[in-house]
Image (spheres, grey):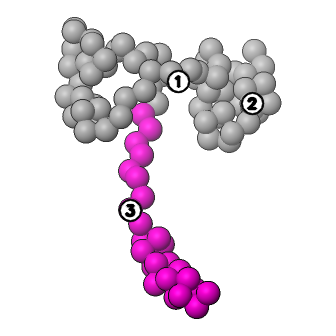
Amino acid sequence: MKQILLLLILLAPALVHADKPNIIYILLDDAGYGDLSCYGQKKFTTPNVDRLAKEGMKFTQHYSGSTVCAPTRSVLMTGLHTGHTPSRGNRE
C-alpha cells in the first residue's frame, strides 16, 4: 500500500505538467471546406491554412447550427441550442 501511494506521489507532477494539445478552430462565414486549397480548391491558394492542415488534423463532418451567421456564432460561444440562442437575426 505504501509503495502504491509513493508511486502516485512521484507520478503526480508528471500528470499535472503533461503537454496539452494546441487546438485552432477556424470559423469562416459563407465558406465550405471545399473553399480551401487543402481540400482541393484550385482557383486560389491558402498556403498558411494548408501548412496547418498538413501538420495537424482535417475534419469534414462539421455542420452549421443555423442558416445565418449570428445564431451560429452564438451557439458556438454559449453552447445553447440554435432555437434558444438570444441573438439578432435568430427570430426573423
Q: Is residue 4 above or below residue 68?
A: below
Q: Quadrant of the N terminus?
A: bottom right
**Residue in the picture at 44% in, 21% down:** 60
Along the line of sight, which residue is nearer the eye, 22 or 92? 22
Q: Residue at x 27, y 22 (%)?
A: 38
Indicate which label's residue lies in the foreground, 1 or 2. Answer: 1
Q: Which residue is mark 1?
A: 62
Which quarter of the picture shows residue 67?
A: top right
Does residue 53 appear in the picture of this structure? yes
Q: As shown in the figure, which amino acid type bears the numbered disc 3? A: Asp
Between residue 64 and residue 17, name the one nearer to us: 17
Q: x, y (%) of residue 36?
A: 31, 19
Q: Secondary structure at mark 1?
A: loop
1 lies above or below 91: below
Dot 3 crowding, Cα within 10 Å, few <14, some 14–19, many 20+: few
Classify 23 as above or below 62: below
Q: Secondary structure at mark 2?
A: loop
Residue topped by disc 2: 81
| Rendering coords of residue 33 (x, y %) | 40, 18
- Residue 71 located left or right of residue 38: right
Q: Which label's residue is closer to the chain start, 3 or 2?
A: 3
Q: Earlier in the sequence, mark 1 or mark 2?
A: 1
* Element carrying mark 3: loop
> Mark 3–mark 1 contact, CB under 8 Å?
no
Mark 3 near mark 2, Cβ–Cβ under 8 Å?
no
Residue 88 shows in this picture: no
Question: As shown in the figure, which amino acid type bears the numbered disc 2?
Answer: His
Can you tell which mark lies on residue 19? 3
Q: Which range is magenta?
A: 1-26
